[in-house]
Image (cartoon, rainbow, N blue to C red):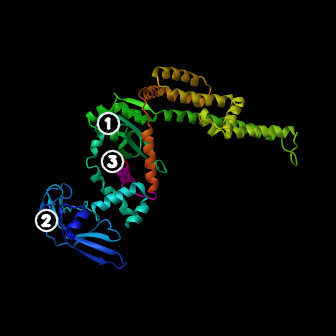
Amino acid sequence: MASANTLCKQLLGVKSAVVTGHDFYQDSYGVNHLRIHARPDKRHENDCPFCHKRCKPYDVQTRLPRIWRSLDWGGTLVEIQYRTHRILCPEHGVLVADVPWAYPGSGFTKDFDLTVGWLAVYLPRSTVSEYMRIDWETVGRCVHRTLNEIEPERSRRLDHLVNIGIDETSYRKGHKYITVVVNHDTNTVVWAAQGHGKKVLEQFYRQLTPKQLSSIRVVTGDGARWITDCVNEFTPSCERCVDPFHVVEWAMEALDEVRREVWREAHAEAMQAAKAHPRGKGRPKADDHDAKIVAAAKAKAEAIKNSAFALGKAPEHLTENQQTRIAMIAENNSRLYRAYRMKETLRLLLKIKDVGEAEAELDRWLWWASHSRIPAFKELYKKIKRHKSHILNTIRLGMSNARIEATNNKIKLIIRKAYGFRNIQKCTWSALIYGYHCLIED
């Protein structure tokens, strides 16, 4: 049968430590405590906490005993007590000697820090703080300390990159963004940094060695010029892809601009009709011609105003009322209906698998947009023509930016769970590192 000291050592999961004793006591709040007296073994008592090399002692054990909190055993709060001393490391200088049960500078055991980090991925920070009975700020520090344990050599994430996706997402109101790089082949985040734009993305590319740069073959993203500029500068031999989702989104923005313009015209006509046919006293009669003219003009404007969802959906997903609304637009407003058809044609040609057929259809669409006499779609024509080769690369390679868009949603989910955070580096970044394996550059 194992002794009590051996049992304590096994439950703590510490091999290179010696348990010298233990005692129970109850604090003023009536909480039961188990205090384990432990020390590193003779072989590791003078190790550096960072390089783990044996060093010379700097002073003797004259300091007050230090307490580390461990995970609770049932309803008993567990602590480890040890009288620390300092060592002199040739590389890191004078510092407190390493203890095998805790990270450097931590007041908790490694198991405690790792448990807090795991809970922080799935629970709000306030819930973790209450459940583990620690301070709000302590949660972020616990998560941050687990980084080196989970992934000590983070630079390896940048090795063997072939297909990557780049995108930015907001983490707070007021144009606060982070830039994220995802490895499509492993479906993991390999790099993230605060801010967006060419200067931020250049930090990622400048970290890569020539060998790592040469391994990149495909870069997906939206149509941002700064992504294209960085790709052309650092990896000119790779293929740039523009995600079809963003292309359709551009068409939707152009369509919505046309819809708003048409609505303003219809609304102005309704106001003019109301002025030209003023209402008389009392309730209008059923055969009142002037009232019918005004009502028809207002109904036309209202139908256009409420058609945003119908115009944005694919025809096969329209409800009966939405189909009626689209038919009404086709009958009464040819310009808006033409814009709707152009959006749908662009959406469908992006689903073509054959690159030659897709290129021919895209050329026809570009000619149609350039001769459409619709300013919004003429601007869209210029944008798509500029990214034509990138769109065709996407169709040929079958690439998508869906993974990084999903990652952005996960990032927003973590931030929402950590509502009220003040330090983006210590709280949100650490949660991203632990939960979604980001490499964060301070």
x and y, in percent, of residue 172 in the image: 47, 51
First of labels 3, 1 by sequence position: 1
The residue shown at (28%, 46%) is: 154
Query: Which residue is more in the foreground, 302 or 313?
Result: 313
Is disc 2 in contact with disc 3, using a CB cutoff of under 8 Å? no
Query: Could you give the CA–CA distance between mark 1 and mark 2, rounded to whole angstroms?
Result: 46 Å
Is disc 1 in contact with disc 2, using a CB cutoff of under 8 Å? no
- Residue interval drawn in magenta: 418-435
Q: Is residue 273 left or right of residue 67?
A: right
Q: Main secondary structure of the magenta part?
A: helix
What kind of element bears circle 1?
loop
Q: Amino acid at mark 3?
A: Glu
What kind of element bears circle 2?
loop
Q: Residue beneath label 1, please?
A: 161
What kind of element bears circle 3?
loop
Query: Which residue is more in the foreground, 276 or 149?
Result: 149
First of labels 2, 3 by sequence position: 2
- Picture quadrant where residue 192 is located: top left
Q: Amino acid at mark 1?
A: Leu
Q: Which mark is residue 441?
A: 3
> Against 116, is 73 above or below?
below
Q: Amino acid at mark 2?
A: Tyr
Is disc 3 in contact with disc 1, using a CB cutoff of under 8 Å? no
Instruction: Point out the frontmost of discs 1 and 2.
Output: 1
Q: Is residue 110 left or right of residue 379?
A: left
x and y, in percent, of residue 106 in the image: 28, 63
Query: Which residue is more in the foreground, 196 or 185?
Result: 185
x and y, in percent, of residue 56 in the image: 11, 61
Q: Is residue 219 left or right of residue 215?
A: right
Q: Is residue 155 left or right of residue 257?
A: left
Q: Which mark is residue 58?
A: 2
